[in-house]
Image: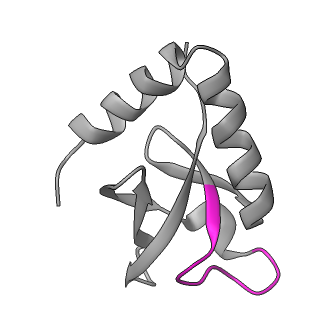
Amino acid sequence: MCLGIPGQIVEIVDDEQHKAIAEVDGVRREVNVGLVAGDPGGISVGEWVLIHVGFAMSKLDEEEAAKTLEFLKLLGGGEYFEELDQFRESTPL
């Protein structure tokens, strides 16, 4: 099963290429923010996004991100930790 997991944008790398660095549970990886860059206000450092296969799919507020992370971990964590492992194993910075 593939999940979208909440991550926080910690750096905008390239506006034109829609590249940013997101952090999920202490793991930092490059993600494509093109799908959320056109949202009102664009995308900024500090914002939370739902990440799936290297793409930020939607923006979340901090409370929603925290609740989602808590829920995923309460599910037994299996799927969450599998997704986190995939995130960790993706192309490192």
Picture layout, residue 84 above or below residue 40:
above
Nearest the camera: 22 or 69? 69
Nearest the camera: 66 or 86? 66
Q: Looking at the rendering, in which quadrant would you find the N terminus?
A: top right
Picture layout, residue 65 above or below residue 9:
above
Query: Can residue 18 be seen?
Result: no
Asked if residue 48 is among those painted magenta in the image, a careful observer would answer yes
Query: Can residue 16 be seen?
Result: yes
Q: Position of residue 4 (x, y in %)?
A: 60, 36
Tell me the residue at 76%/87% (across/down).
Answer: 41
Picture layout, residue 58 above or below residue 3:
below
Asked if residue 77 is among those painted magenta in the image, a careful observer would answer no
Q: Is residue 1 left or right of residue 72?
A: left
Q: Is residue 5 left or right of residue 89?
A: right
Q: Main secondary structure of the magenta part?
A: loop
- Give the quadrant of residue 70: top right
Tell me the residue at 43%/63% (across/down).
Answer: 22
Q: Position of residue 84 (x, y in %)?
A: 40, 34
Q: Looking at the rendering, in which quadrant would you find the C terminus?
A: bottom left
Q: How many marks?
A: 0
Q: Position of residue 81 (x, y in %)?
A: 43, 25
Nearest the camera: 24 or 36? 24
Tell me the residue at 72%/31% (across/down).
Answer: 71
Q: Which residues are magenta?
A: 39-49
- Model colouring: one colour
Q: Is residue 83 left or right of residue 47?
A: left
Q: Position of residue 45 (x, y in %)?
A: 52, 83
Tell me the residue at 64%/74% (across/down).
Answer: 37
